Amino acid sequence: MRHVVIASHHRFASGLRDTLEFIGGDLGIVDINAYIDDTPLEDQVRTTFDSFAPEDEVLVFTDMMQGSVNQAFIPYIGPNVFLVTGVNVPCALELALSASPLTGEGVAAVIDAARSQLMFVNAQAVPVDDEDE
């Protein structure tokens, strides 16, 4: 079984969960919004992983590579646990909705493709269609 966890500083995780479920339906995503109350992040992460079976596939998205939230998940990385940081919506959707089991190579390929979605639009030559409403 695949579990999807989104974790971030403050409420980015719940916002991304809401967006993904608006587009992809109920995905059973667990969101961890760190530092909004007195619950230690490590306790939230441990409780989340304790609810998964060891053979389950776990896909974790975090907000920032060097951030404390991402660092809290590093001890859980394993053959069935995939940690992706700096996530965007296209990347999260493609991985969360993947019908086949995840692999390191497959995750890396999706991340490479998602990078192409990040661009400075002002520098792009965008044609203007005067007939478009």
Image (cartoon, grey):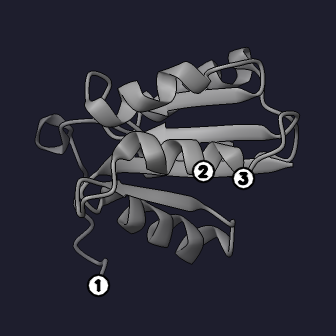
**Mark 3–mark 2 CB contact (< 8 Å):** yes
The residue under label 3 is which amino acid type? Answer: Ser
Task: Indicate the position of residue 106 as horizontal and vertical percent values.
Answer: 72, 23
Tag 2 residue: 48
Density class for disc 2 (Cα within 10 Å; few <14, some 14-19, many ≥20) is some
Vertical arrangement, residue 15 with respect to residue 97, above or below: below
- Kindly tell me whether residue 67 is visible in this rendering: yes
The one of 38 and 31 positioned closer to us in this rendering: 38
Callout 1 secondary element: loop
Task: Indicate the position of residue 43 as horizontal and vertical percent values.
Answer: 45, 46
Callout 2 secondary element: helix
Q: Residue furthest bottom?
A: 133
| Residue displayed at 48% across by 60% down | 31
Q: On residue 133, which mark appears?
A: 1
Tag 3 residue: 51
Number of marks drawn: 3
Within the image, what quadrant is residue 12 found in? bottom left
Give me the C-alpha separation between circle 1 and circle 2: 47 Å
Task: Indicate the position of residue 116 as horizontal and vertical percent values.
Answer: 41, 31
Whichever of callouts 1 and 3 sits on the residue coming sooner in the sequence is 3
Vertical arrangement, residue 27 with respect to residue 5, above or below: below
| Left or right: where 89 falls relative to 100 | left
The one of 60 and 37 positioned closer to us in this rendering: 37
The one of 79 and 35 positioned closer to us in this rendering: 35
